């Protein structure tokens, strides 16, 4: 098991803070809010593989374009005198030229901060959005009587959040409306106050839901109020 993923993100007090905020928001709106927090939206193993392959190919290209300077450098390092390079030697060197840079880059990119730094922003945004949609399908989609579920998804490693709403809400609320909730949430989160940020985002989402889906006298709380950690 991934030790980092097994480490709790929120404390018991944090869970109560978020659950209380969800309860207050749902008390004034006919909707269900689910908060989901994860260490990272993806492992980005394919990104590490891509960088490793690129470095290996560049090393092979350098060997192909500048064979004699590189062979001379290798002779000096290994203290080879008048060495005659055979075809077998050159093929072995070409293989090492690919394998060693690939392995070194792959090992270096096992360190998550470096792997994330080298992952292009659009890829991170797409992975966070995909994980948020998956969380929505699992935690909220089709699980409320009026299709009024909302998932607030936060991924800490990428410093990104997404808000995904069920189709009844999406039909009335444009995606850009959630901008205030995102702004309210990320301010506290950047300062390390994750629970406070989630509570602020929940409050803003609750205000939007109350404007379009005011609370009626039907039973509420169809989904759990506490945050889900992935």
Image (spheres, grey):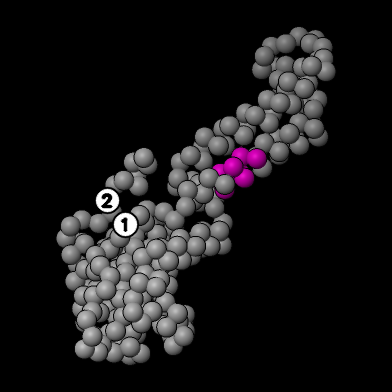
| Residue shown at the point (29%, 90%) measured from the top left | 214
Looking at the picture, does residue 33 appear above or below residue 52?
Answer: below
Residue 92 % position (x, y): 73, 20
Residue name at image x 27 percent, y 63 percent: 227
Query: Which label sits in the foreground, 1 or 2?
Result: 1
Residue 74 seen by the camera: yes
The picture quadrant where one finds residue 106 is: top right
Q: Are marks 1 and 2 in contact (CB under 8 Å)?
A: yes
Q: Nearer the viewer, residue 169 or 144?
A: 144
Left or right side of 23 for 6: right
Residue drawn at 23 percent across, 85 percent down: 218
Check disc 1: other Cα within 10 Å, few if <14, some if 14-19, many if 20+.
some
Q: Nearer the viewer, residue 116 or 77?
A: 116
Looking at the image, is 169 positioned above or below residue 143? below
Does residue 6 appear to the left or right of 17 in the view shown? right
User: In the rendered image, which residue does mark 2 sit on?
Assistant: 8
Distance from disc 1 to disc 2, alpha carbons, whole Å, reads 8 Å
Mark 1 = which residue?
Answer: 229
Q: Range of the magenta residues?
A: 47-53
- Above or below, 162 against 175 in this view is above
Q: Quadrant of the N terminus?
A: top left
Residue for point 56% across, 62% down: 122
Q: Quadrant of the C terminus?
A: bottom left
Label 1 or label 2, whichever comes before in sequence order: 2
Q: Secondary structure at mark 1?
A: strand
């Amino acid at each position: 098991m991934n030790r980092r993923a097994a480490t709790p993100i929120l404390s018991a007090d944090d869970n109560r803070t978020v659950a209380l905020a969800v309860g207050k928001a749902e008390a004034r709106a006919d909707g269900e809010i689910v908060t989901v927090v994860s260490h990272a939206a993806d492992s980005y193993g394919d990104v590490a593989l891509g960088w490793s392959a690129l470095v290996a190919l560049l090393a092979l290209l350098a060997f192909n374009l500048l064979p004699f300077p590189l062979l001379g450098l290798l002779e000096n390092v290994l203290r080879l005198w008048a060495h005659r390079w055979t075809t077998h030697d050159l093929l072995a060197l070409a293989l090492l030229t690919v394998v060693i840079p690939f392995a070194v880059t792959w090992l270096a990119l096992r360190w998550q901060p470096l792997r994330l730094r080298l992952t292009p922003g659009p890829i991170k945004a797409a992975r966070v959005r995909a994980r948020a949609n998956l969380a929505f399908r699992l935690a909220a989609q089709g699980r409320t009587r009026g299709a009024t579920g909302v998932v607030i998804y936060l991924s800490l490693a990428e410093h990104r959040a997404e808000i995904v709403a069920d189709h009844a809400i999406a039909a009335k609320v444009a995606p850009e409306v959630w901008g205030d909730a995102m702004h309210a949430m990320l301010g506290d989160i950047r300062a390390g106050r994750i629970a406070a940020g989630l509570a602020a985002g929940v409050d803003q989402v609750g205000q939007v839901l109350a404007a379009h889906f005011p609370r009626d006298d039907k039973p509420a709380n169809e989904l759990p109020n506490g945050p889900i950690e992935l």
